[in-house]
Amino acid sequence: MKKQAGLWIDHRKAVIVIVTEEGEDIQKIESGMGRHVHYRGASTTKSPYSTQYQQGDDQLDNKFTEQLNKFYEEVIAHIRAAEAVLIFGPGEAKGELEKRIEHEGLKAHILAVETVDKMTDRQISAKVRERFPT
């Protein structure tokens, strides 16, 4: 059975449309993270022990990266069996996912990576059906 996938992705969520001869299936995956805020430090205090209770840049970046890695792993698990994959989205996430897929040896499955703006689920589904007509 022929299985193709199209996915719209940003750092907050992924909308995956799986197209088969039997029809299409839409799945949403939430990353569970908000915007990546760069830590610029807190106001200075007079207490000599106060800094040990604040998270620094490295800790926040590591937490963001770990959460993003789990998100990408879940997305890849959903599209792993697809013969062809179309990736599109507004920001950096699509390129990061492409590198991750390439690292896992699934590069041959990627049909195209396109930059698009925010889209509704219906628009995403229509774009994927247009690319992969049944």
Image (spheres, rainbow, N blue to C red):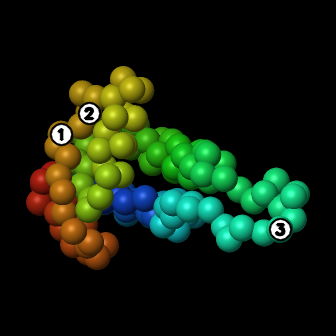
Q: Confirm whether residue 5 shows in the render.
A: no
**Measured along the vertical axis of the image, is residue 111 above or below residue 20?**
above
Place residue 2 in its image quadrant: top left
User: Looking at the picture, which amino acid does disc 1 mark?
Assistant: Leu
Label 3 secondary element: loop
**Measured along the vertical axis of the image, is residue 107 above or below residue 15?**
above
Name the residue nearer the viewer: 87 or 130: 87
Q: Name the residue located 87 percent from the left edge and 65 percent from the top edge.
A: 47
Q: Name the residue located 20 percent from the left edge and 46 percent from the top edge.
A: 113
* Apparent side of residue 69 relative to residue 118 in the rendered image (left or right): right
Which label sits in the foreground, 3 or 1?
3
Q: Name the residue located 34 percent from the left edge and 34 percent from the top edge.
A: 99
User: Looking at the picture, which amino acid does disc 2 mark?
Assistant: His
Residue matched to label 2? 109
Name the residue nearer the viewer: 133 or 65: 65
Q: CA distance from mark 3 to mark 1?
A: 57 Å
Asked whether the beta carbons under mark 1 and mark 2 sit within 8 Å of each other, the answer is yes
User: Looking at the picture, which amino acid does disc 3 mark?
Assistant: Lys
